[in-house]
Image: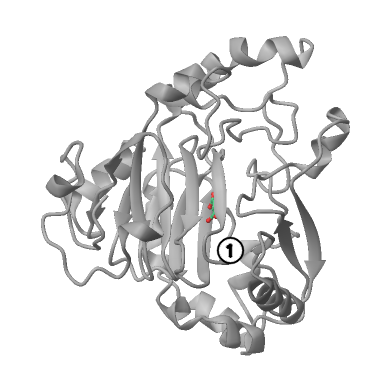
Amino acid sequence: MAAATVENDPTASEGSAAAFSEVHNPIWSESQLRKYPFQTRPIPRLSHTDPRAEMLINNEEPVVLTDTNLVYPALKWDIPYLQDNIGSGDFSVYIAENHKFLYYDEKKMANFENFTPKSRRIDMKFSDFVEKMHKTQEEGGDVRVYLQQTLNDTVGRKVVVDFLGFNWNWINKQQSKRNWGQLTSNLLLIGMEGNVTPAHYDEQQNFFAQIKGYKRCILFPPDQFECLYPFPVHHPCDRQSQVDFENPDYERFPNFKNVVGYETVVGPGDVLFIPMYWWHHIESLLSGGVTITLNFWYKVHYMTKRCANAQEDRKPIERPSEGGHHEKHREDAGGGTGRPTRGWSFTEYDDPGPI
Ligand SMILES: O=C(O)CCC(=O)C(=O)O
């Protein structure tokens, strides 16, 4: 993939040269990307005013929108600013023994007694997270931390003001014209360079707004389900791929040889549309410093044919290990994303009171 952040043609097919016709001051380089044994095509980068962008979103295909100003007031967020203004609430921080933060649903752990997670979640104050992150960096070992916390009403005033200044006009229109359900949550992700969120899918539409640093996002359409081998529905890692992208076991997962991804690198101000049920693998670039992202998850009360087919395909794959259960994914407090929401509700910000 070419190191660039320029407009490209959404109709371009394989090969980065066709999609990235010009290179202006690349801000990252190929050497900052991890190596994987599969092909990818570029995700188009377009202005939000480009009709092709609307078409892609309507078709539930990914696109990077370069100029929405969705989180413009947050582009000044960095660790010192957040330390002063994010408030004194508790933050979910995952600590992993290496760079891979394979998500697991704590509530499903009782279903698989032999399951030992490779990361653990600890609730801590923001300043403790910062200290932990610096200490981890200084130690230079494999251990890493990743803050993943839904914004809630413990955030400080300045962050509320920033939040109110988001481009709600644009995003609310996106929601209403497609008849999506409500915005369920905004997950704030603060990661160390090199952190990886392995491939998984969520059951919500996602506008993924990059605030600080660069993230490589590799997406796979729902119909590549058979190549990605999700854990069984009742497993704590439900909705996550069992395949280790860095060392795929082709004997267990032979169809992984056929997987083809779509990829992009997002930087500050970019908004990636991750359609629901699209698999996504996300990595903070190597040697790229801290990354900050805020996502916008929307519930949807319909399922496209493409998603329905993929979910249907899932049954025969999983039934043998599930002991005959036929339950569909449970919608938890995270709206089917599996992550805790901590009771925050968007409407609380409609009238913030005196600021
Ligand atoms: O940014 C990440 O590391 C993961 C984010 C993610 O999976 C999501 O927004 O759905």
Q: Is residue 192 above or below residue 94?
A: below
Residue 136, horizontal then vertical, whole percent: 69, 71
Q: Is residue 321 left or right of residue 200?
A: right
Q: Is residue 338 visible?
A: yes
Front-lying residue, 201 or 342: 201
Q: SS for tag 1?
A: strand
Taking depth in this image into account, of 270 and 17 the one nearest to the observer is 17
Q: How many marks?
A: 1
Quadrant in which residue 268 is drawn: bottom left
Q: Is residue 308 visible?
A: no
Residue at the spot x=51%, y=27% of the render? 228
- Amino acid at the residue labelled 1: Leu
Q: Quadrant of the C terminus?
A: bottom right
**Looking at the rendering, which quadrant does residue 28 occupy?**
bottom left
Q: Is mark 1 within 8 Å of ligand 1?
A: yes
Query: How has the structure been colored for display?
Result: one colour
- Point out residue 293 in the picture as x, y percentages from the top left corner: 51, 65
User: What residue is at 55 percent from the left and 52 percent from the top?
Assistant: 196
Q: Position of residue 352 (x, y in %)?
A: 62, 79
* On screen, residue 70 above or below 276: below
Point out residue 84 in the picture as x, y percentages from the top left corner. Answer: 65, 89
> Which of the 4 image quarters holds residue 265?
bottom left
Residue 339 horizontal side relative to residue 9, left or right: right
Residue hosting label 1 = 189
- Residue drawn at the location 60% of the way across and 9% of the way down: 316
Image position of 103 (left or right of 21): right
